[in-house]
Image (cartoon, rainbow, N blue to C red):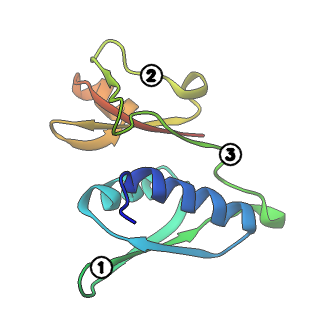
Amino acid sequence: MTMTDPIADMLTRVRNAQSAGKDTVSMPTSKKLVEIVRIMEQEGYIQRYDVIDGEPCGTLEITLKYGPKKAKTIRGIKRISKPGLRIYAGKDDLPRVLGGLGTAIISTSRGVMTDRDARKEGIGGEVIAYLW
């Protein structure tokens, strides 16, 4: 069985691991997944991540973050742009997740960044996912 959408797979693994109360979650890695996870760490949704080299491909290991009494830091994750239907937003149409309380992950010509950073840069791109 081949994986058609590795980004959706990663987001689902993180969602399921956090619902189950796991400390870490592992998955096959790619450059785009590492960039998405870097943003998740930068925004404070996960504790840290490690890329473990291996054959034929590496492994991405994410250490999840919890609040007091094992409270989830990620309330929701939603994949927006899918392989069958790509969703793009111009610089003036960038989405605001929960009125700015959440984060939209945007793939731009200058790399993967948050909606706030894309607004500062004045560029649009493909809307990958929403996090809140």
Residue drawn at x 36%, y 29% as measured from the top left: 85
Answer above or below: position of 28 versus 38.
Answer: below
**Marked residue nearer the N-terminal end (2 or 3):** 3
Q: Nearer the viewer, residue 125 or 48?
A: 125
Residue drawn at x 48%, y 49% as measured from the top left: 43
Q: Give coordinates of residue 111: x percent, y percent.
A: 21, 44
Determine the CA span between mark 2 and mark 3: 18 Å
Amino acid at dot 3 = Arg
Q: How many marks?
A: 3
Amino acid at dot 2 = Pro
Q: Quadrant of the rendered structure where residue 116 is?
A: top left
Residue that mark 1 sits on? 58
- Disc marking residue 75: 3
Q: Nearer the viewer, residue 101 or 86?
A: 86
Q: Give coordinates of residue 32: x percent, y percent.
A: 28, 55
Tag in front: 1 or 2 = 1
Horizontal side of 123 relative to 11 (left or right) equals: left
- Image quarter (top left, top right, bottom left or bottom right) of the N terminus: bottom left
**Marked residue nearer the N-terminal end (1 or 3):** 1
